[in-house]
Image (cartoon, helix red, strand yellow):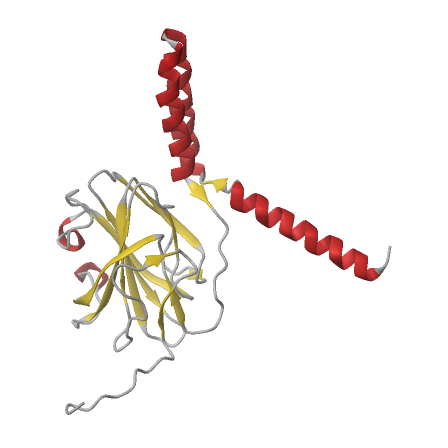
Amino acid sequence: MTGHDDDSADVAAVRTVSAAHSLFPRIHRDGWRFVAFFAACSALLALLWWPLAFPGLALTGWCLYFFRDPQRITPRRPGLLVSPADGVIQAILMAPPPTELEMKDSLNVRISIFMNVFNCHVNRVPADGIVLKTVYRPGRFVNASLDKASEGNERLAVRLVLPDGRNLAFVQIAGLVARRIRCDLQEGRTVQAGERFGLIRFGSRVDVYLPDGVPSLVSVGQTTIAGETVLADLAYFPPHRSLSS
């Protein structure tokens, strides 16, 4: 076999593996006990009356789908800030970062991403940096699509120091049916954009507070992909507009 044939075989193997990951993504380890629970319920229902197994199997399939953890390709150009969550951008507005993160008192662009129960809920780090602070705060469980959820709901906030010294904040927020926030980050840890860091179940929201003066490159209603969709570019400077324009 020639070297060209070897290269073609390698490319074909990579494509096969990639296709397999797309069709059958791995399942987050937190999901297996829920999958086992729904599968056991399905089996029990089938023993009682076999048609009852169908709703149980449907719930088991949904559970597998909910806890999927697909591979993502994160853009590696320095300065890009990527989405921490799959979902839909619900709001972009100016707001102060959470007080528990002890950032300076200023208004920053806040991008709110809402995740429904059909979105992938594995969260990813939005930028390279060092974790300076993580703070959990208990709270309510109102609908995460409401703006007041940013202030009143249970949340876990993270303050990240970027390579250029600026600060970025992102917050996992529990929702109406979400009752568990998982964050694997520890203070002092060095992280990379696109790295998995946590999970919220079931249905929730993630807020991202951009560094001072950094504009959003996305819009309300846009669908985001965790680790891939670019939210902002630290090197981007919007064109200056005069007051008369």
Q: Position of residue 106 (x, y in %)?
A: 17, 73
Residue at screen point 64% across, 47% down: 16
Q: Where 101 falls versus 18 (above or below)? A: below
Residue at screen point 42% across, 15% down: 43
Give the residue at the far top of this rendering: 48
Q: Where 24 falls versus 108 (above or below)? A: above
Examine the image and state in which quarter residue 128 appears: bottom left
Quarter placement of the N terminus: bottom right
Q: Position of residue 57 (x, y in %)?
A: 41, 24
Q: Nearer the viewer, residue 111 or 49?
A: 49
Q: Is residue 7 left or right of residue 221?
A: right
The answer to whether residue 242 of the structure is visible from this angle is yes
Residue at screen point 19% across, 60% down: 98
The answer to whether residue 33 of the structure is visible from this angle is no
Give the residue at the far right of this rendering: 1
**Number of on-image labels:** 0
Residue at screen point 50% across, 59% down: 73
Q: Position of residue 49 (x, y in %)?
A: 37, 8
Examine the image and state in which quarter residue 94 appears: bottom left
Q: Nearer the viewer, residue 79 or 244?
A: 244
Q: Nearer the viewer, residue 103 or 29?
A: 29
Q: Where 57 falls versus 101 (above or below)? A: above
Q: Position of residue 225 (x, y in %)?
A: 39, 56
Q: Nearer the viewer, residue 150 or 240?
A: 240
Quarter placement of the C terminus: bottom left
